[in-house]
Amino acid sequence: MAKSELYKQILVSLPDQDYPIHIGENLLADPLFLRSVVKSRQVLIVSNETVAPLYMEQLESVFADRQCDVVLLRDGEQYKNQESLTQIYDKLISASHHRDTCLIGLGGGVVGDITGFAASTYQRGVGFVLIPTTLLAQVDASVGGKTAINHSLGKNMIGSFYQPDAVIIDVKTLTSLPKRERQAGFAEVIKYAILKAGDLSLEIKHLLEAPFSETNLLPVITQCCEIKVSYVQEDEKEQGRRALLNLGHTIGHALEAYTRYERWLHGEAVAIGLYCIALLSREMGYLEQSGVEQVDELLKLAELPRRIPKDINLDNLTLLMAKDKKIKNNKLRFILIKKIGECYIEDKVPADLLQKVLKLAVEGE
């Protein structure tokens, strides 16, 4: 059995709770480490039909000395819904899980979001630990305490802020990740490079140009987590600065809802959103054309979609944006880019300018 190696531990310090993010290799192969993190005598592991065959058996063996139940969800963003949530509640209640139980979310962002929401609402709140197995979840979705399910009219419309007891990031889980899933995760990595100027863009280029190595991802995953933690510690409930982390997501979420979460992975929709926002920032008179090209180049290097397909009705897409959670005082707010490393919240984007930008972003335009 490969030896586990802890690369970095990041402490998230919040007014009501502190918790660690453990980042390393072969952490799932270390029973002593896992038992030191999850101490509850009752455990419910939530995963999906894709991830479970890879890791469930070894995880169940770690907790064989206690009550350990399992819920397997169908794989896909379209299953982050009330039906899947009820599946978790049914198991918790039928197996008599108490308030000191611990839920473990083993999977990508969908599993993490729905597990966290179940934990936040079951018996008014129980503990949970996240084990993200996708790059997107490791750099973004597992950090910060956002939990939710989707509604047919909008993404993440039903949810809560509820922090985990711990996050365990084992980069070895990325070896089994399909290339498309891995590349989708780079959309969130690129988002952080836009938010924070520095060496991250260069590191991303080096990673994407070299043969894939999960070990080489450790510094970038760590840096992304540290950036997000700094936003979360300053603004846990997203009343101000944390909203900047939604860069690219207003348009991305609308694209996902438009296609009923079946056409793109979350990161792919965000990638299109990032390109659109770069264009909008330029048209608003802030971002230089060189900045637009820098964003486009990174997305292209990551083999991510950057253009809106011609079959998307832009008027209907705009209507879906009107259901965005960042709306304040009836104004749709976009996260725009002044320059790489400096973003801001803008609530005065003219409707005709938004339509112009969306048309510019359509394939072939």
Image: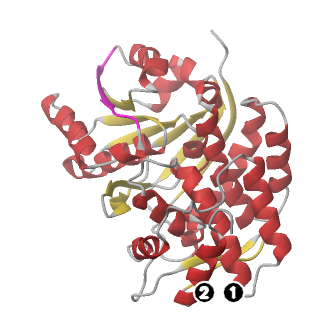
**Label 2 amino acid?**
Leu
* 56 sits left or right of 211 in the view: left
* 2 sits left or right of 68 in the view: right
Question: Any magenta on residue 69?
Answer: yes
* 293 sits left or right of 324 in the view: right
Few, some or many residues within 10 Å of mark 2 (<14, 14–19, 20+): few
Tell whether label 2 touches label 1 (CB within 8 Å): yes
| Image mark for residue 284 | 1
The residue located at (65%, 79%) in the rendering is 344
Residue 349 appears in the picture as rendered: no
Of the pair 17 and 22, the residue shown nearer to us:
22
Q: Residue 182's image quarter?
A: top right
How far from the left and from the top, in percent, is residue 122? 23, 47
How far from the left and from the top, in percent, is residue 142? 51, 47
Total marks placed: 2
Q: Nearer the viewer, mark 1 or mark 2?
A: 2
Magenta stretch, residue numbers:
65-75
Of the pair 87 and 124, the residue shown nearer to us:
87
**SS at badge 2:** helix
The residue located at (49%, 25%) in the rendering is 34
**Label 1 amino acid?**
Met
Is residue 299 depicted above or below 250 in this figure? above
Is residue 185 depicted above or below 104 in this figure? below
| Image mark for residue 353 | 2
How far from the left and from the top, in percent, is residue 363? 64, 62
